[in-house]
Image (spheres, rainbow, N blue to C red):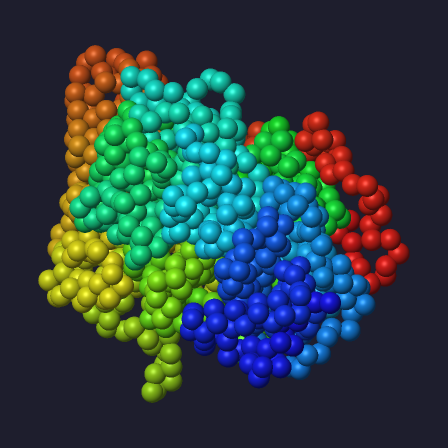
Amino acid sequence: MSLSLRHWLAEHDIEIPHIDRFSSGQIAGLAFRIVQDMELKSLSIFDLCPFVEVLEVPLGADVLEISTFAQLTQNLVSAFSQKKSLKRNEGTWLAFQIAYLRALHQVLSQEKKLRRPWLSRMMIWDSPPSSLRLLPDAQLQGLLKTLRPGKLTDTQAEQALSVVADSLLVQQMNNASVAWLLANSAEEAEAKSLVQRLVNGLTGHLLAAIAENAPSFAQLQKFFRLGNSLLPTSTSTVTAGDKIDLYRELYRASLIQSYSEPLFAESFSLKDVYVSPKGQPLEKNGSGQMPTTSQAVDLMTWAQQQLSDLETVALIESEVGYGKSSFCRIWAGILAQEAYPNWMPVLINLSEVTPCESLEATLNSGFKGNFHVNLSEWLELSHPRCLLLLDSLDELPPSYLGKRAKAIFIQQLIDFQSKHQHKIFLTSRSAVLQEIAQDLPSQLNRITIEHWEQDELRQWFQQWAKVQSLPVAQNFFTFLKQAGIFATKPELQELSAFVRQPLMLYLLGILHRDELFDDEILQLAAQAQHRENASLLWEIYYRLSKWLFGYPQAEGIKTVQMGWGSSHIHRTQEAIANLLQGHHPEELLEIMQDTALRILHSGHCRINLTEELDILPAFYFKHGEGSRNFLNGIAKVQNPKSKLKNSLEFTHSKLGDYWSAKAIIAGLKQLVKRIPSAYGEPSFILDSESEIALHLYKLLGYGALSQEIEALVIEGLRRLNKWEFSFEVLCQRLLPFWYAYCQGYWLNEGIGHQALSYFQMFQNPVNLEQVNAAVGFNIFLLLFSSHQEAKKEFFPCGSPASLTEFNSEALMWLIGRTSILGKNILISRIRSKPFSFINLSGVYLEAVLLAGANFGKVNLSRAELVGTNFATANFQDANLAGANLSNTNLDNANFMGADLTGANLTGVNLDSVNLTNACLFQAVLTDEGKQIALRKGAIFSSEQFQIIKNLLSQPSLLNVNNTTDKTVIWANNNMLEKGIIESIEGDLIVSEEPYDDCGDNPTVVSDR
């Protein structure tokens, strides 16, 4: 005989949805009456199984009841323990009921937010519960019978508490959950993924349940490192003097519960596919830190070793997408389970902090739960010591101090670490550290995450096979292998580099899974090897949006049904309809671009919302604090009516770069967009100069365009149809604004002030000077690249032929003006760009650092370049006639074929300069310099220079050959032979079942 809570409540005219509105005292009273009835009927705790009651009815009937059953069970625990102390097996039975129901509710809530098709097939979320109709599934009901009445010996209880996921009890509950999901229209692979995700965070829910009911679960505490049971001075028994910091335990639990969060919009989680990367430690030397010559080490092992060093801050660095944030999340959960109470992990995303006067106040502002728990109180304790995982230094909110704010923050960390009480780990992009390299203190232990090699790739493909299927993973691996991606010296270097980055490999895996990663991308990758642009990256991002929104296929509709399941779930019409929620795809894309622009214009990585934006795809956007388990748990404990602020951010900054670029492209298109006038002639929608100026100040005044976004903007503009966009027209529209900007006209007209008010609406801390500098910086970069695309000459200082228009100091002024955005920011961005189609004749650029710049074929005639550093710069075939190069640094510079007629070279060391065929006719230099120039191959005759120039300009017979397109390299047999991860030899994934390419099923299309 067993007790059905559902029947008991119905007999007493209590509707389950109403219980959610009961006060804590009313629910406790309800639980007390249930326990009294059980005593009268001589029922034991094992006759009670709320988990079975949830699973025996359809999902539509109980999704609103799951948390109610968990809450009621928690109150039953208190009622039982007031009668008598719970035995270990009794406590274990009830604790697992509560934890599993909470974990199930967490996963189902996530599925609801993702708008899964299987949910749409089964239920309406806000409908009232149905009658006590059982699910007519024989297998499910058979599995549930094994759990009611419950049977749990003390040995089995100890096993469940010790190994949790691998215990017999959890496996029984897992099997029943899979059967229940299948009965509710989920597919088998999907159901197993959901249950695995649930199990990933189950230990966290157990920890929370036991901590919240610590006196009742006294015998369970030691298994989850609760109380004082693990301290050196503790005894094996728990006494009344032991205390538990509930908020600390709930925070610790939330770190483990986060393992259940879906990865982007997948049915699996990060933990299911995570592979620990390797890194190269940097050793200190006199000038800074350099890579060691030793072999790369496992990042997790290195991090564990750092715990014994309380004198330095551990710094993990890499470029975007190498797994810094993923490592922090995974390691925080491991520490919460295995290192506590010796170490208390605290994970803080630095994008969420608000800079304050003290470091403790700054960190507390970004601490999850800071409205109830003050982190500084934890930091004042000697035990447990806090392990601060500070993620993403590069996302530290902007400050009026500019990049110095990051250096100051690091120094604050060093000062805090010097107290030798707690331990700090910091992560950052390598590029950000290079910008403040001179200010980095020596008390940093640094490690650089390296790209994945053979071992990590093998592990990832094995994980991919588990969360997808063996054929999907094997086909993806084979495709990459045949393209030579795994070769020691791959021909598709850019694509090979992407595959060795965790994020990009996952994104490519998505595309290949849904047949959007094909030979066309390989061809594009081959072409991209020979030019610097973001064509390959743009194509990947574009196809991801194509995959998500189900764009019509250029090749038409497939005539054979694709196999259903998680590997194609996002491409079904159901999934697309759920995503769009009645919106047209173009409408949703516009909402996404507007949201991306708001995030970009805020200057922060996240924005606080005043309205709900549930329409935004979870693949690209995620809500911040409102979804955190810890916050929700604490809010219920302290103030059930408290509301958490709703914040929004990109799921990953790389995906954010794409949508930010799309938003800027949309803004630039407005400049060239025409509409018919009243007389039928087309006119620009932004016609007046002041309208254009305000539009550009608002679009580009937020801060400096990142290199990634800049490259994507140019690539996106390049891909627009010719009828809707032209680089030449864009240049024509931007140039008048640019020349007026260089005269300070728009600032005087108050345009900058209007833009500043706009950015302040988004809490962007930029000031007027920074807005003005950002506009100039961004417009110059756009003009620089747009003229190259249009193949039109760009005069940044105006035409030298017009004395009224020409401003020789415009660039010098811009360099100085933009220094407020970062030291040498303009020079560092343009130094690596080719200066083709830019005319710098007569320009004034004195004492500027332009080492390594590419001035090939550039017109620098009559330019004032005194004291400028041109070391290793390229001036091949450039025009420097009449230029003033006195006292410049030309070490290892290349002037092959350059015209230096009449140039001033006084005070210049020509020993290492390449002057082959350079014309130094009438150049000003010493006799010694002239002798050196002659030995270097310089020409001192204008006539000879022209003759040689004409001869060299003629096409050589040696270059006339067959230039057959060599981009189709994936069809090259030699390359197929080279494309092998040597020791894998195709046997990447081991399976007990042979891979037979889906057998004889005619409804499935193979990737082979």
Q: Quadrant of residue 570?
A: bottom right
Q: Which residue is found at the position 19% from the left and 62% from the top? A: 756
- Residue 542: where, in percent of width, then height? 53, 58
- Residue 559: where, in percent of width, then height? 78, 67
Which residue is at the front of the view, 852 or 580?
Answer: 580
Count every numbered label the image shows and give the total.
0
Q: Is residue 277 left or right of residue 737?
A: right
- Residue 414: where, in percent of width, then height? 26, 32
Q: Which residue is found at the position 19% from the left and 53% from the top? A: 770
Which residue is at the front of the view, 537 or 88?
Answer: 88
Q: Is residue 100 left or right of residue 645?
A: right
Q: Is residue 896 left or right of residue 629?
A: left
Residue found farthest to the bottom: 678
Up-down relation of residue 318 to residue 184 (above or below): above
Which residue is at the front of the view, 995 or 554?
Answer: 995
- Residue 345: where, in percent of width, then height? 41, 41
Residue 823 shows in the view: no
Q: Quadrant of residue 369?
A: bottom left
Q: Which residue is found at the position 73% from the left and 67% from the top? A: 1
Residue found farthest to the left: 748
Which residue is at the front of the view, 322 or 310?
Answer: 310
Q: Is residue 383 left or right of residue 658?
A: left
Up-down relation of residue 336 to residue 582 (above or below): above
Q: Which residue is found at the position 17% from the left and 16% from the top? A: 926
Residue 408 shows in the view: yes
